[in-house]
Image (cartoon, grey):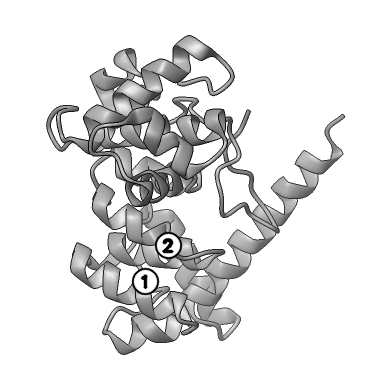
Amino acid sequence: MSDETQGPGMPTDRESPVGQPVIRGDPDATGEHANRAVKFDPTDDESLEAAATTVRAFAENTVGDEDSVYMLRGAAACAALVRGVGSYKAAAERAGGETTVSFIRKWSRVHDLPRSIRRHVAKGEIAPTAAKHIARVSGTSRFLLAFAILDHGLTVREVRTLASEITDGADPAVVLGQAGYPLGELTIRLPVEAYCELRRRASLEDESPGSLIAAALAEHYDAVGESDRRQP
């Protein structure tokens, strides 16, 4: 199952099954770690016990190095355990040790982030501790905060502060802009021929290159989305 679709109404939560190593099992994202990806099935007792053991080790910081892939595995175990036992409290009790309800809740939410964000976590481009704060916000604010991290190199402390303001009701674009992290600015590299054509058309149409790129992307992804909807 695709974890994230294109076009209007893009999902801002996970769509693939809980515990499924969609990103952890992808060698393009996690390299050699992909071969060791663990699936946690909340409907299987043996798998649920493995999830509980993993959560306890994760909570007690014995799961291994503070590596993004290990943390995503811990997050997957948290989410599967919650799904399997029915509540954060029951999950914390099942894991035991130093596991708390707050710990389970935070990391389960990371597992529920959309694929395009989790992929950057797995590749080490977004710190797992920053992902916890991204998961605190909802809707498209998740994407805006995550991509601001990629574009501006935000620290975990900065992400935490911005996430708090957004959850308090502030507009994410305004908050990020006021903090000096404007959205929508990218430096891209094009083939010379495409670059020349973009500049030529922008001049003829009296538009900015950015406006033409935005229009072309909107048209392309609308067409892709329409094609997907026509599939049987």
Residue 116: x %, y % from top left: 46, 46
Determine whether the residue tagged by mark 2 lies in a helix, strand or loop: loop
Residue 232: x %, y % from top left: 87, 29
Q: Nearer the viewer, residue 197 or 184?
A: 184
Q: Which residue is mark 2?
A: 136
Q: Is residue 200 above or below residue 117?
A: below
Q: Are marks 2 and 1 in contact (CB under 8 Å)?
A: yes
Q: Is residue 67 above or below residue 53?
A: below
Q: Amino acid at mark 1?
A: Ala
Q: Which mark is residue 163?
A: 1
Residue 168: x %, y % from top left: 45, 81
In the picture as drawn, the residue positioned furthest to the bottom comes out as 178
Q: Is residue 179 above or below residue 8?
A: below
Left or right, 120 with reference to 154: right
Q: Is residue 119 above or below residue 165?
A: above
Residue 23 can be seen in this image? yes
Hey, which quadrant is residue 122 in on the image?
top left
Q: Earlier in the sequence, mark 2 or mark 1?
A: 2
Residue 99: x %, y % from top left: 29, 39
In the picture as drawn, the residue positioned furthest to the left comes out as 65
Left or right, 118 with reference to 171: left
Could you give the CA–CA distance between mark 2 and mark 1, rounded to whole angstroms? 7 Å
| Residue beneath the point at 47% across and 43% down | 88
| Residue beneath the point at 56% across and 86% down | 206
Could you classify mark 1 by the number of other residues whose Cα lies within 10 Å: few (under 14), some (14-19), or many (20 or more)? many
Could you classify mark 2 by the number of other residues whose Cα lies within 10 Å: few (under 14), some (14-19), or many (20 or more)? some
Left or right, 108 with reference to 99: right
Q: Amino acid at mark 2?
A: Arg
| Residue beneath the point at 41% across and 62% down | 195
Determine whether the residue tagged by mark 1 lies in a helix, strand or loop: helix
